[in-house]
Image (cartoon, rainbow, N blue to C red):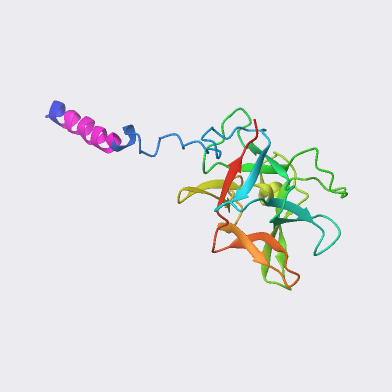
Amino acid sequence: MKITLAAFVVLFFALRAEPLLGGGGAGAEPEPVLDSGGGKLRAGRSCYIQPVPIPPSGGLEVASIRRKCPLDVITVQEDPSLPSLFIPINSKKGVIPVSTDLNIVFSDETDTGCPHSNVWRLDDYDNSTGQWFVTTGGVVGHPGRQTVRNWFKIEKYEESYKLVYCPSVCSTCKVQCKDIGTYLDSQGYEHLALSDVPYKIQFLCPA
């Protein structure tokens, strides 16, 4: 009887574990983010975030619209746009996988004229517009409560990608999870902001 019961227990747990062994199980490695040329997006490499479908030119910039500093992240329809670096929470990972917490930094060569950093962060709620804007002035690394506004994710979206604010760097923090989309203000500037409609993007990484 003991042998039969033991065999049943082994079989039970084997059957429960079986789906996890497949390629699509919970233990599967997340797929890497690919750039527009099909290469893997790598940590610390300078790339341009471009809208999809691709206009003749354009991408992302910073501008002093709501205040002098820190600057807001906006879309532009002309060049030059600003390149970005992606720094995952696990700094040892050379390749950026989807769904991982990461910092986004406009390249160090960017001179914004502000004392704040070029690290993206989610700003405080803007009462005048009812928006949560993406701005600059964040810090790289140091995951936790104090930096929870500085972390974003890249998720697969249709045949391309989207940016998401849904940090998992603080287990005790109450955060909202939402796509990064755009908001057109009264002056005609298109800001990055939390939205129900994602800003569909690709990554252009010059050789």
The range drawn in magenta is 5-18
Front residue of 97 and 187: 187
Q: Residue furthest left?
A: 1
Quarter-of-image position of residue 46: top right
Specify the farthest residue to the front. Answer: 56
| Relative to 190, 16 lies left or right | left
- The quadrant of the image that shows the C terminus is top right
User: Of 159 and 180, which appears nearest the observer?
Assistant: 159
Residue visible at 72% across and 40% down?
Answer: 140
Residue 23 image position (x, y, % from top left): 35, 34
Q: Residue at point 51% right, 41% down?
A: 98
Quadrant of image for the N terminus: top left
Magenta segment, principal secondary structure?
helix
User: Is residue 36 left or right of 106 when viewed as pictured?
Assistant: left
- Relative vertical location of residue 75 with respect to residue 30 in this rendering, above or below: below
Give how far across and how far down residue 60 sits, in percent. 69, 51
